[in-house]
Structures are given as C-alpha cells and as structure tokens.
Amino acid sequence: MSFVSPYERLQAIGLTPQLLSSLPFPPPEGEAALMRVAEVHRDGLVLHDGESTSPARTRPALIQALASEADALAVGDWVRAERNTFGEWWVDARVPPRTQLARRLHDGREKVERVVLASNVDTALLVMGLDHDFNLRRLERYLALVRLAGVGAVVVLSKADLCVDLGRRLRDAQTLAPAGVGVLALDSLHDDVPSQLAPWLAPGQTLVLLGSSGAGKSTLANALCGEAVAATGGTRRGDGRGRHTTTVRTLHPLPGGACIVDTPGLRSLRLDGDAGDVAGAFDDIAALAAQCRFRDCRHEGEPGCAVRGTVAPERLKSFGKLVREAQRDSMSALQRREQVAQWKARSRIGRANIRAKRG
Ligand SMILES: Nc1nc2c(ncn2[C@@H]2O[C@H](COP(=O)(O)OP(=O)(O)OP(=O)(O)O)[C@@H](O)[C@H]2O)c(=O)[nH]1
Ligand SMILES: [Zn+2]
C-alpha cells in the first residue's frame, strides 16, 4: 500500500509549497490538520482534505477575532482544524488569505455588511449568458470587483449557441475588459470546456465562478469536473432569469489539479472599497482623470475635463454611480445619520424660502 502524505493530498485542492512554507502555525500533525474550507453554512463549515469532506465548526474566539476586522471564514480559506475525542472537527486558526473577493450587503436602512465571497482565488470566471442575461453595465461591476480584490479574471460568455449577434457582443465585452482579461464565448453544453479554459486550469490554481442566477455557472462547473457535481436549473420562461438553483458556495477539485468554487447567482453586487479604490478600478478613467484641470474633477461638466467626451457616456454614468455608492456605503452609520439630517434641514429651509417668496 502506498502512503500519501496529507500535504500531497492537499495539492489536489490548491496547496502550494509557498503556502506550506508560510503557515502562521507549526505544520499540524496528529489529531490536527491543515484543510481548506469547501463550504460555509450558517451553523458550520465543510472542510476538504484533498480527498474527502468533513463537517466542522469554528471556535468562537476565531469567529470573534475575524469579526472585529469585518472579516469571516470563506470558502477557499486554509485553516487549522483539530479533531476532539468525539471525532468532531474544530477550526481554531486561519492562514491569512492571499486574496479575498468581497462585496457589501446593504440591509436597505443604514447597515452595510462586508461579505467575503471566496478566498485565495487566482482567477474569477465572470460568467454571463449571451441570452437575456447579457448586460455590459453588470459586467463592469464584476470587473471592478475582481480588480479591487487583485484577482485575475476571464469573461466567459455562455450560451453562444443561443446568440444571433455573437460578433458584436464579443466586441462589446472585449472593449470593457482591461488588458490581461480574456473574453471568450462558448456553448457549455457541447463545447470542450476544459480545453477552452486550459490556460487558467494549471495544477494548484483556484478559480471561482461569478455571475447572475441562470448564467450557466453550474453547467460550466460540471463540464470542468467531467461529472455532475452541481445541480443546474432552467431559466424562467418570459424573462429568462435564473431560478437560483445553487444555494451555497462550494469548492470542487478538478481532474487536472486545479479547483473551482461554484457560487449562487448574486442578486446585487455592491463593491467593497472606498470611493478612491472604486475609481481606481476603472483604469481608463483613472488614467484620463490625471489630465483633468481640477484634481478633484468629478467629470460632470467641469471645465478642462479630460474624461467627459472621451469615455463613453454610459460607462461614465455607471462609473459615477459606483463611486457614489461606495462613498455612501463607506460612511459610518453616524455620518449617514448626519447627512440625512442635513438633507432634511436643507429641504426645510428650501420649503421655507419658497413659502416666503410666494407670500
Ligand atoms: N443552450 C445553452 N444552455 C445553457 C448553457 N449554459 C447553461 N445553459 C442552461 O442554462 C440554465 C441555467 O444554467 P445553470 O448552470 O443552472 O446556471 P447557474 O448560473 O448555475 O444558476 P444559479 O445556480 O441559479 O446561480 C440551465 O438550463 C442550463 O442547461 C449554454 O452554453 N447553452
Ligand atoms: Zn474630469
């Protein structure tokens, strides 16, 4: 019988020699192990050891330490877990992630929460269907998300078989994609997906599938795995939207030594960064803005603006929207209350002025 060390097994789910040599704790042994988070649930985790998965829970001290920095364990994290006498796994430490894809969730009132979508990702596959799903403004958001996280990306336009003006849509997506971000169109049900994505599937690589519900993420995951690992759903009749078939982010090892995280479709995507970060995620605009006459130019009609007139109006509009959204979300709850109070005061004064004029 040949002996496979736990570290060799972990190579199947992305362990690299660099990671192993930079652990913030001694290499676990005995009842402790290095594992990778494969799923995060409300009441626990699923850990992968490179061969199989086990349920686990997180020590409250670790949850609290992470929460104090608006952080939490996410799929893709490397952790130290220890098995107790009942055979239950408990996670007590995390390896600081190389990358974190995160978004903000807004509760509709004033609470903004940071949610980590996946950790230690090398390449995000930004999946967009060439059917009703195709939306360049949404793609812009996803491109900014990966840019903010410092994660590589490929735009995967699925359902090429359903598209009549493929050439134009490919060109439109290519125009948005910054240098180094590939754009490809495919029919995930019939094309040889692993060979089309081969450049990003080297052993040790971690990929994540991002996109709206029904875009075809799980179909791609299955095509890459060579078997049905993720449930796929149809799209709704009428509007062609997805049915939110995938409900949890899950890490799957791939046959060639890479691994992939399938994620549920995101209903909304608010970027996790301050206004400056978000503005910087639009390379073309950032480069032109350096030539605007005013350093704080908002490109909204100021004289000497180098951006307006050069950047497509719809791109500039969504840039402005994302920057303002980031600004609002970055404000503390207190600042936001103060701003609302100011608005109210201003409109009270405005109404009083109007009344005074009238009469
Ligand atoms: N014709 C065609 N259909 C596709 C293609 N890719 C996916 N589909 C179909 O689109 C529907 C939705 O695909 P899924 O893979 O479940 O989509 P998803 O992005 O995982 O959706 P959620 O799990 O809801 O987030 C399914 O009926 C798939 O069979 C494609 O390239 N061509
Ligand atoms: Zn300007």
Image (cartoon, helix red, strand yellow):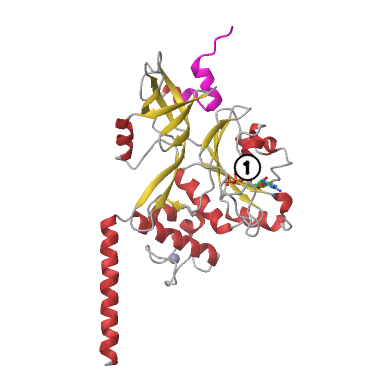
- In the rendered image, which quarter contains the N terminus? top right
Residue most toward the bottom?
Answer: 359
Q: Is residue 83 above or below residue 72?
A: above
- Res 68 → quadrant: top left
What residue is rendered at 54% in x and 56% in y?
A: 138
Magenta run includes residue 114: no
**Residue linked to disc 1:** 232
Is the CB–ligand 1 distance for label 1 below 8 Å? yes
Stretch of the chain drawn in magenta = 1-18
Q: Nearer the viewer, residue 340 or 286?
A: 340
Amino acid at pointer 1 = Thr
Q: Is residue 239 left or right of residue 355?
A: right
Pick the front one: 192 or 181: 192
Residue 338: x %, y % from top left:
25, 63
Q: Residue at x 45, y 44 (%)?
A: 149
The residue drawn where x is 38% and y is 66% is 294
- Of all residues, the one furthest to the top in this rendering is 1
Q: Position of residue 166 (x, y in %)?
A: 71, 55
Give coordinates of residue 275: x percent, y percent.
39, 56
Left or right of 302 in this view: 349: left
